[in-house]
Image (spheres, rainbow, N blue to C red):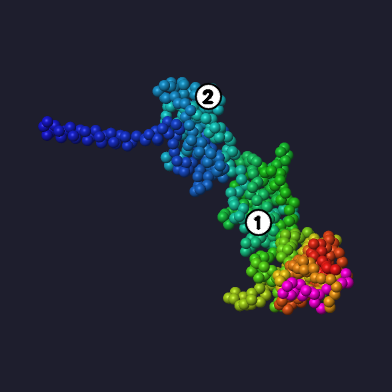
């Protein structure tokens, strides 16, 4: 073969190869081609920035502004993001259940399918937007409709769900939430209601009433109000054109609720008008949206609110993590000082410390934090003697305490807040936080948790030794006195000898019971009747005398430790062990 012929054949083959590569590169891949055969249109939903629905009562236009969607026509309002998302999702996943190619159709057939001049059209605008969707008539199969894409003669049979979704009035595309604001972003609330004007603001992370009085506001009460407003669903909208506010009782609203949020320059303002006579629902106006809407009747609850409904129902507001010392100061009696050492509480008496009953401390903290104010008695508190608060029967002070100087504070006690309790009247005790000018009424039962008697705060453990530490015993039970001491061979009789031998088992049982004796409960007062005593000494040189008294309520007996305040209840099993005979006849 000649060289020239070979060259020409090679060039022709290369050209053919290049044409095939270029042609194939412009054809959709196998997977994409399959998707195009399966779905009506392929597009990226994120690239769509507009939706136009034509053919209904009026053309509806939705437009994306930043990350938000708005209705632009025939009214201007926020769009329902969920509805917009559903339109885009259904459009992008609309399947062809059957198709008829255009070359197989005549012009009159397009008309018979209702897709020649469609009565309902959906146009999506934006990056790589698909052609306009032209919806036709329903097919003989229930729930299916004919559809054609603008610029194409092919007719497809598809599900009628998308058609039903867009064939609705404009109100269906409007946001039915009162506001698109997160409740956690609201930092100021104001109300104009029959009771007057109420203003609440968040200051330093805490809600405060600022009008008509300055007082602590309750977190739950304020957040409930904010939530009830933001979570109220709009039931319907009044006609936009020529809306007569007087017709809806909105020329002079019965109430106005305004929410200010850190995430919005414009506040959420809700004006509450008249009640609809037919449905009982309530007309309201959303100022920012310039819309009159219908709300459920429960929105009228705001009309009956009072300033006290928003007040903090706790007597004092204190962060317990900051509290290191609690002082209970009863009138005319010694004070009780509770000191926290790491996570444990103890009784303080000067520099001395004693174990405390943790259940009592927990009951005090729960009472202060959870017992609610029953009534707000006086907002001026100019006549404290009237309530017994000029000389309170009890003052409870919560303090921070530092044992050494720091950069922030000097060593010593720094009071945080003091609660004072006065006279008891009709089941309630008058009380106040001494840094506030208010007098309130609380259930008198709170005083039980705050009992300032030192004896009731002592730990339930009466003694805490190991049995081997007890070196001698002396008992006087039922008139019989016995003295024992621990020898190398066990317990032996000491002092005046007598008849009988030592019951070593009972003596050891008595030592075991004494070493870890625990009270059932502690009570104030003195042991009125003594039925015996048990004295013992320890290897460390400590001596104790346990006094036994009359039977206690619930079983066992009452007891006391000589030289220590208060009495306590001893359980029946412990009493039996304490009264065991130590001598066998």
Q: Quadrant of residue 174?
A: top right
Q: Can the viewer see residue 176?
A: yes
Q: What residue is shown at x 80% (from left), y 62% (from top)?
A: 573
Question: Looking at the rendered structure, which numbered label has been put on residue 189?
Answer: 1
Q: Earlier in the sequence, mark 2 or mark 1?
A: 2
Decide if residue 397 is in sight here.
Answer: no
Quadrant in the picture for the C terminus? bottom right
Q: Residues within 10 Å of mark 2 (few under 14, many from 20)?
A: some
* Residue on which the image places disc 2: 139
Q: Which residue is located at x 71 percent, y 73 percent? A: 469
Left or right of 339 in this view: 333: right
Where does the image place residue 373, in percent across and percent down from the top left? 76, 60
Total tally of numbered discs in the picture: 2
Q: Residues within 10 Å of mark 1 (few under 14, many from 20)?
A: many
Helix, strand or loop at label 1? It is strand
Magenta stretch, main secondary structure class: strand
Alpha carbons under labels 2 and 1: distance apart: 55 Å
- Quadrant assignment, res 499: bottom right
Q: Is residue 413 left or right of residue 568?
A: left
Q: Secondary structure at mark 2?
A: loop
Q: Residue at x 45, y 43 (%)?
A: 47
């Amino acid at each position: 073969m000649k060289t020239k012929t070979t060259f020409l054949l090679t060039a022709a083959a290369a050209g053919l190869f290049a044409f095939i590569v270029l042609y194939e590169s412009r054809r959709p891949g196998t997977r994409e081609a399959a998707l195009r055969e399966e779905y009506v249109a392929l597009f990226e939903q994120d690239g769509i920035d507009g939706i136009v629905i034509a053919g209904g009562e009026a053309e509806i236009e939705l437009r994306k502004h930043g990350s938000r969607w708005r209705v632009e026509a025939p009214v201007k309002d926020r769009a329902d993001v969920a509805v917009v998302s559903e339109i885009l999702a259904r459009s992008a996943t609309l399947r062809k259940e059957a198709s008829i190619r255009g070359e197989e159709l005549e012009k009159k057939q397009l008309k018979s399918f209702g897709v020649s001049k469609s009565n309902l059209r959906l146009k999506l605008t934006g990056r790589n937007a698909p052609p306009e969707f032209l919806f036709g008539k329903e097919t003989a199969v229930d729930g299916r409709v004919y559809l054609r894409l603008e610029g194409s003669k092919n007719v497809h049979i598809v599900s009628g769900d998308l058609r039903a979704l867009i064939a609705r009035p404009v109100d269906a595309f409007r946001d039915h939430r009162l506001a698109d604001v997160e409740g956690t972003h609201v930092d100021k609330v104001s109300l104009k209601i029959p009771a007057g004007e109420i203003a609440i603001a968040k200051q330093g992370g805490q809600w405060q009433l600022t009008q008509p009085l300055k007082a602590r506001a309750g977190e739950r009460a304020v957040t409930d109000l904010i939530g009830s407003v933001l979570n109220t669903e709009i039931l319907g909208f009044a006609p936009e054109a020529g809306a007569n506010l007087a017709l809806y009782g909105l020329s002079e609203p019965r109430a106005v609720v305004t929410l200010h949020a850190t995430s919005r320059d414009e506040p959420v303002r809700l004006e509450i008008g008249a009640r609809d006579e037919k449905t009982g629902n309530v007309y309201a106006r959303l100022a920012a949206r310039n819309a009159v809407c219908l709300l459920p009747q429960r929105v009228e609850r705001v009309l009956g609110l009072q300033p006290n409904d928003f007040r903090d129902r706790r007597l004092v507001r204190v962060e317990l993590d900051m509290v290191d010392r609690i002082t209970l100061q009863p009138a005319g009696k010694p004070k009780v000082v509770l000191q926290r050492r790491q996570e444990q509480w103890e009784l303080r008496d000067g520099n001395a410390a004693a174990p405390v009953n943790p259940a009592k401390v927990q009951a005090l903290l729960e009472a202060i934090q959870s017992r609610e104010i029953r009534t707000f008695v006086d907002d001026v508190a100019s006549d404290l003697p009237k309530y017994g608060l000029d000389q309170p029967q009890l003052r409870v002070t919560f303090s921070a305490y530092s044992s050494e100087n720091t950069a922030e504070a000097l060593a010593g006690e720094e009071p945080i807040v003091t609660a004072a309790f006065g006279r008891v009247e009709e089941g309630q005790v008058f009380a106040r936080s001494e840094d506030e000018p208010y007098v309130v009424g609380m259930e008198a039962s709170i005083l039980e948790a705050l009992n300032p008697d030192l004896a009731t705060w002592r730990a339930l453990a009466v003694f805490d030794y190991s049995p081997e530490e007890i070196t001698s015993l002396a008992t006087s039970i039922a008139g019989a006195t016995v003295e024992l001491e621990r020898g190398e061979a066990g317990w032996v009789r000491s002092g005046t000898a007598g008849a009988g031998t030592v019951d070593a088992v009972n003596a050891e049982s008595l030592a075991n019971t004494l070493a870890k004796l625990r009270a059932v409960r502690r009570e104030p007062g003195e042991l009125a009747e003594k039925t015996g005593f048990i004295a013992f000494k320890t290897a460390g040189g400590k001596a104790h005398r346990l006094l036994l008294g009359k039977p206690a309520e619930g079983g066992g007996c009452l007891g006391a430790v000589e030289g220590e305040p208060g009495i306590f209840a001893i359980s029946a099993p412990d009493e039996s062990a304490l009264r065991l005979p130590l001598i066998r006849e």
